[in-house]
């Protein structure tokens, strides 16, 4: 079985940032998946699950209502490892081209007085939210992006090299 591309990223070297995870061509239209990494995998603790859930609701609402971007947004959701989010947009922009959008999105959390869509009819786990923690993580990440906007390391995935046999089979750690 082939290793999927996102598993070829060296998670021991990745830093918080915005990375192009993949670009798909669907019926002649480019669709780009971005890895929005909020914490450093395997180094920092993951984002608190209730804060992650609240960030998902608040930022998804922000992105889908932003007048300049709402028609480009396909998906915003958390990574299973709870170290960041996936953002899927129409088109294919370099990560640097969406940094200002993400700064605004994370900055919008600090002004939130409530988490949208938390009624039992709207949310599959309506009791698992934490606006206070969400504000803390959002402020920390927005400040980080602002102070690192010109640092190419926050836009470039560190790749891992895999040993291969002469016939092309790869060795994997496990």
Image (cartoon, rainbow, N blue to C red):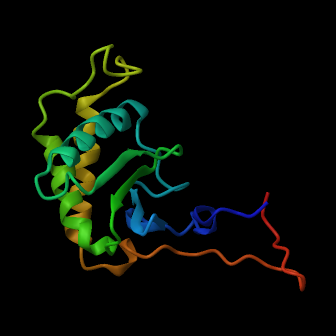
Quadrant of res 132: top left
Question: From this viewpoint, is residue 41 visible?
Answer: yes
Q: Residue at position x 37%, y 71% from top? A: 154
Above or below residue 50? Residue 137 is below
Above or below residue 30? Residue 64 is above
Q: Quadrant of the N terminus?
A: bottom right
Most foreground residue, 49 or 166: 166
Point out residue 97 in the picture as x, y percentages from the top left corner: 25, 73
Quadrant of res 130: top left
Point out residue 170 in the picture as x, y percentages from the top left corner: 81, 73
Q: Residue at position x 47%, y 44% from top? A: 82
Q: Residue at position x 33%, y 75% from top? A: 94
Most foreground residue, 149 or 75: 75
Q: Residue at position x 24%, y 66% from top? A: 99
- 161 relative position to 65: left or right: right
Question: From this viewpoint, is residue 38 visible?
Answer: no
Above or below residue 9? Residue 80 is above
- 2 relative position to 125: left or right: right
Q: In this view, which residue lies farthest toward the bottom?
A: 166
Point out residue 17 in the picture as x, y percentages from the top left corner: 36, 65
- 9 relative position to 85: left or right: right
Q: Quadrant of the C terminus?
A: bottom right
Q: In this view, which residue lies farthest toward the front?
A: 27
């Amino acid at each position: 079985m082939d290793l999927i591309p996102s598993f070829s990223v060296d998670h021991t070297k990745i830093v918080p940032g915005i990375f192009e995870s993949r670009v798909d061509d669907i019926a002649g239209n480019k669709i780009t998946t971005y890895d929005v990494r909020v914490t450093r995998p395997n180094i920092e603790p993951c984002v608190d699950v209730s804060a992650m859930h609240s960030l998902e609701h608040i930022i998804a609402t922000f992105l889908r209502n932003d007048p300049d971007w709402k028609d480009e947004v396909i998906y915003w959701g958390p990574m299973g490892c709870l170290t960041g989010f996936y953002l899927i947009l129409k088109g294919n922009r370099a990560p640097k081209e969406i940094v200002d959008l993400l700064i605004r999105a994370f900055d919008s959390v600090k002004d939130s007085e409530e988490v949208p869509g938390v009624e039992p009819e709207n949310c599959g786990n309506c009791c698992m939210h934490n606006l206070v923690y969400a504000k803390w993580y959002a402020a920390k990440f927005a400040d980080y992006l602002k102070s690192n906007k010109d640092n190419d390391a926050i836009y470039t995935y560190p790749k891992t090299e895999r040993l291969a046999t002469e016939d092309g089979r790869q060795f994997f750690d496990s």
